[in-house]
Image: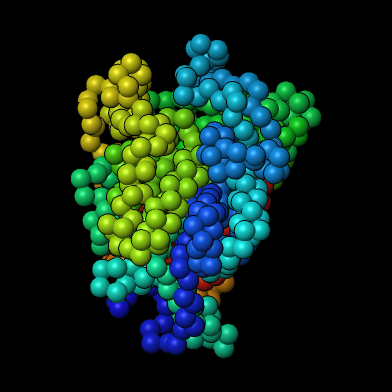
Amino acid sequence: MSHHPTSLNLPDVEREELPVDVLLVGAGPASLSCAIHLKRLLEERGMGDKEILVIDKAKEIGHHTLSGAVMDPRGISDLFPDWRERGFPVISEVGDDWAEWLRPGGKHWTMKGPLCPPQLKNHGNLMVSLNQVVGWLAEQAEQAEIMIQPGFPASETLYEGERVVGIDVRDGGIAKDGSAKANFEAGARVRAEVTVFAEGTRGSLAKQLFTRHALYAGKNPQTYGTGIKELWRVREEVGREMHGKVFHTGGYPLHAGGYGGSWVYGVAPDQISIGFVVGLDHGDASLDPHALFVQWKQHERIRPLLEGGEVLRYGAKTIPEGGYYSMPKLFGDGFVLVGDSAGFLNAASLKGIHLSIKSGMLAAEAIADALQAGDTSAQGLARYGELFEASWAKDELWGVRNYRQAFASGVSTGMLDFAVQRVTGGRGLQARRPGHEDHACMQSAAQAKLEKPKFNDADSMDKLTDVYLSGAIHEEDQPSHLLVVDPTICVERCTAEYGNPCQHFCPAAVYEWPEGADSVVINASNCVHCKTCDIADPYENIEWLVPEGGGGPKYVDM
Ligand code: SF4
């Protein structure tokens, strides 16, 4: 058995062994749907005694789950055709929807009805809080006697030869200097026939699997956006006006400079969910997704919605936007990948929850077959790939397969290509557009143009105020889970070449370069686990490793 070198665990400690049949790493919609469907299938086949364990790094299930969210009901309808009767937590049905193009100077154009881009039509979709959805799925899983263990961060993958045989949980109680504290607790060793990696976007173990098993051979690299979200209690008249309505904006503050846009969802009679997403291939070394979000909130079209309101919560996450050609091979010896970790997301329609649920269900079918046949090798699990190729999830992703890559050449090219894609079954102007690594798009500090907005306490909070609203907290005395692989690069190259972009792109003010400092200050405790740093660092010099159990944001109703 070999260990991956990037774990923060102490070597050579005795670990409690937990043998299970199927281990699911992460408890988001893909994972829980996989566990529920798998249990069902195994019971049908007289194999109901197989043990299924779901683990998650958050202190409580759902605390690390963040989304807009407007959900396409297709996934949940496949998992539970009677989801309504079962009390699936819908906040509201989408009643009206439109798109707006924001212009400088406070102006905007509204695109309604036939003018609204078809992929942004949301009639019939559901407004949900993904925390609530995940909480509900966890209840269904527990009723089905599936074991769920929060506060269990998977810190390294276990191998026998090249076969994945489980994971080690991160140790608790290690001091900053690497020594064991009085409360040291060795992380458990969970062994499994099949391990399902459902870590969400840019999974830290999934990333290692991609390299070790060449899962991206022949694929486009994944491309990400960073999404910032706030939940607001708004004035009564705004809440009433917006309830059940959805609109998206493009344009300001990005104009044509980079891919991105926003959402405004009237989630409750007194609440709106707002957010802004920007592609991490933007290229500007001073790219600051949080600053763009603030500028967007200050636009004349948005600001009046927030006036007199109160921000309740904040969160940020990255979003795998690459689509079909940017998905890794979905399986290997002893493992499968589902959900955001495997890129199940339709960037054109800004939706991934339904695809995540479906990916979990398809994986469950392949795992059940593999367990029944006694072959959980890559060959035994290959049916997952076949099932995906034959599914509506594939059809949907195939229909927008060149969508995001077309925008890499600029917003106007992207829009033109998307128009052609609409009449060519998703092909567009090129059969397969090439992809790119986001970090490789970064231009030099000399070309950086983006500026910071002015903050105020009313609607434009600075990062630290927002971080407070994310509930992020970590044990301070632990080795930083943000590993700067070669700190000399930061000072000797990055400062001059890119101006230390980590101080800009992190939406939680984790990386600071105080005036005159000769190294970066890392406020790891602020981290909201968005993974932007792991993706966007131009030297790939930051490794996001999993922190001690329970650390991270505390998303509630987000
Ligand atoms: Fe996101 Fe990295 Fe900042 Fe944490 S440190 S909030 S993962 S950019």
- Image position of 82 with respect to 185: above or below: above
Q: Which quadrant would the N terminus be assigned to in this image? A: bottom left
Residue that appears at 47% across and 62% down: 25
Residue that appears at 71% across and 28% down: 243
Query: Where does the image place residue 76, in percent across and percent down from the top left?
Result: 57, 40
Out of 256 and 130, give the one closest to the viewer. Answer: 130
For residue 490, say whether it is visible: no
Residue extending furthest toward the right: 236
Query: Where does the image place residue 108, in percent across and percent down from the top left?
Result: 54, 17
In terms of image quadrants, where is residue 5?
bottom left
- Image position of 540 with respect to 11: above or below: above
For residue 236, say whether it is visible: yes
Q: Determine whether, in the image, residue 57 is placed left or right of residue 370.
A: right
Query: Where does the image place residue 122, in percent across and percent down from the top left?
Result: 56, 25
Q: How is the image coloured?
A: rainbow
Number of marks: 0
Residue extending furthest toward the top: 114
Residue that appears at 47% across and 19% down: 118
Residue that appears at 39% across and 55% down: 369
Q: Determine whether, in the image, residue 262 is placed left or right of residue 94.
A: left
Query: Where does the image place residue 126, in percent across and percent down from the top left?
Result: 62, 33
Out of 120 and 415, give the one closest to the viewer. Answer: 120
In terms of image quadrants, where is residue 232?
top right
Out of 306 and 277, give the one closest to the viewer. Answer: 277
- Image position of 167 with respect to 226: above or below: below
